[in-house]
Amino acid sequence: MSKPKKTDASPGMAFERPVQVLEAKLAELEELDKTTHLDISGEIEALRNKVRAAIEETYSELSPWDQVNVARHPDRPVTSDYVAHLFDDFMELHGDKVFGDDAAILTGFATLQGRRFLFVGHRKGRTTKERVETNFGCAHPEGYRKALRKMKLAEKLGLPIVTFINTPGAYPGIAAEERGQAAAIAENILQMFSLRTPIIAVVIGEGGSGGALGIGVGDRVLMMQYAYYSVISPEGCAAILWKDGARTPEAAEALKLTASTLSELNLIDGVIAEPLGGAHRDRELTLRNMGRALMDHLDELGAIPLDELLVQRREKFRRIGAIEGRFPTTV
C-alpha cells in the first residue's frame, strides 16, 4: 500500500476521520524523523501498522451510504487519470455532427498492452474549473450522440469498445431536454444491443440513472469495488419518497447499489478490486487492477463469435428483473 496521505477531513467521509487522525500523527512523526537524530523508526512502523489496521477495520464495515461517499471521493481516479496513466496512447475524437462537442463525454482510440480499442467515458474533471466545464460528468444529448457515432465507427473498423461510467446522471437542464436528452439515451441503449463488436462497460465511480445506461450496455458490465450503480442518487430517492434529506443513508441501503450486492443479484458481471481503503489511497495499484481486468475480458470476448456474442448480450439484459423464469431467454 502506498504511504497514506495527510488529508483534510471531508464532511462526506466522516467514517474516515479516526483514520485521518492516525495518519496526521504518522505524518508528524515522519517529519520529526527528518529533523532529529533520535531513532524513532520503531514508533513510526508501529503507527503505520496501526493505521493499516484502522483502515482494514473501517472498510470492513462500510454501509452503502459510506460506499457512495468513497465513490465520490475528490482524490479518486477519474477517466482522465486512466487515459493518461493506463493507456499507451490516446487519440481523442470530437463532436456529434449535429450540435456540438460535449466535454462531459470523452471518446477516442486507445491502446492497452498492444490491444487497440475505442474508448468512451464520462469526464468529470479534476479541478473545479474542469468540473464546471464538464458539468460534473453530467452529459448533454450531444454527448450521447457523439458516443454512439464513435461506437458505430468502432464497429466498422472491427475494434472492441470500452466504456467508463462515472456520472450522477444525465444533465437535467431545460436546454438538454429540448435537444432530446431522453431520446438520445434511449437510442444509445437500443443501438448498443446490435453493435457487432465486443463491449465492456465499467462503473469506475458513480453510476447514476439513464446517464449511466446511455453508455452502459455491454457484453461485460463491471464495477469497481467501491463504485455504485443505481436508478437514482440516494439524495434524489430520499427527496422523492420521504421529502427528507436526513433519510439519504436509508435510501442508499434500500437501493441495493453497491458492487457486492449487484454482483449477488447477477446484475453485473464482475467486481474490480480496489486497494485497501479505496482507489484514492493507491492510484498505481488501482491502474494495474483495471488494466488486468480489461485485458482478461477483452481476450475472453474476442474468442466468442460475433453472432453468438450478440445473442448473449441481449439475453443477459432480458434476464435482468425476470421473476421465476417467466421472461423468455430467446431473442
Image: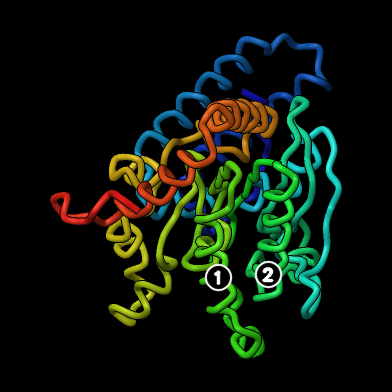
- Residue type beneath disc 2: Arg
Secondary structure at numbered mark 1: helix
Nearer to us in this view, 24 or 32: 24
Residue beneath disc 2: 145
Q: Marks 1 and 2, Cα distance to the nearest angstrom?
A: 9 Å
Whether residue 242 is situated above or below residue 292 in the rendered picture: below
- The residue at 45%/36% (across/down) is 271
Nearer to us in this view, 35 or 287: 287
- Residue type beneath disc 1: Glu
Picture quadrant where residue 23 is located = top right
Nearer to us in this view, 158 or 36: 158
Horizontal and vertical percent position of residue 275: 55, 30
Horizontal and vertical percent position of residue 13: 51, 52
Q: Report the disc number at residue 328.
A: none
Quadrant for the N terminus, please. top right
Q: Report the disc number at residue 187.
A: 1
Callout 1: 10 Å neighbours few (<14), some, many (20+)? some
Horizontal and vertical percent position of residue 45: 60, 14
Considering every residue shown, the one lying at the far front of the view is: 307
Is residue 45 something one can see in this rendering?
A: yes
> Mark 1 touching mark 2, by CB under 8 A?
yes
Horizontal and vertical percent position of residue 148: 66, 62
- The residue at 54%/39% (across/down) is 306
- The residue at 51%/63% (across/down) is 189
Q: How many marks?
A: 2
Compare marks 1 and 2 and give the one earlier in the sequence.
2
